[in-house]
Amino acid sequence: MRRERGYLYPEWELVAREAPGFMVAYNELYRHALASGVGLPIKYRELVALGILAFRGETGGLVNHIRRALRHGATRAEVLGALEATIVPGGALTFLNGLRALARLDAEGGRKGT
């Protein structure tokens, strides 16, 4: 999971130990939803995911999905554009959540793309 996504939450490690069958099913769902690239390239799937995570205020997850979007070819301008698109349907706080995650990524040395 860590190798495939580039991250692994401690909570998923717990589920993998306690309910490995559930984790297998979840990973399959994840692959179809975010990692398949069928019909919509992965970078765009990640941009959709980061918009939703910004709306939900999930900054930690948002940082990971910004990384994945960049790794799959998104530019910083595209990431910022996806965050800008959240301001009307999601409100200023959604946009701010996204900016905080982007700033956190920069602070961690993850600034890539233009």
Image (spheres, rainbow, N blue to C red):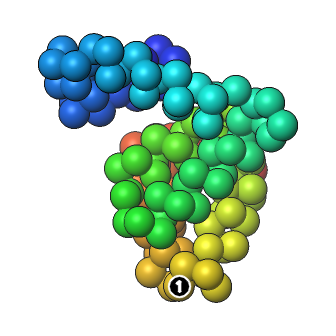
Please say if 1 is above or below 76: above
Q: State the residue position of label 1.
A: 91
Left or right position of 16 against 28? left
Please say if 60 is above or below 5: below
In x, y percent, where is residue 85? 69, 73
Badge 1 amino acid: Gly
In x, y percent, where is residue 78? 74, 56
For image coordinates 47% across by 69% down, the residue present is 55
Residue 84, image quadrant: bottom right
Q: Nearer the viewer, residue 63 or 39?
A: 39
In x, y percent, where is residue 7? 40, 28
Any part of residue 103 in sight: no
Q: Quadrant of the N terminus?
A: top left
Please say if 102 is above or below 55: above
Residue 40, image quadrant: top right
For image coordinates 38% across by 66% down, the residue present is 57
Left or right position of 24 against 28? left
Left or right position of 34 against 25? right
Q: Nearer the viewer, residue 57 or 75?
A: 57
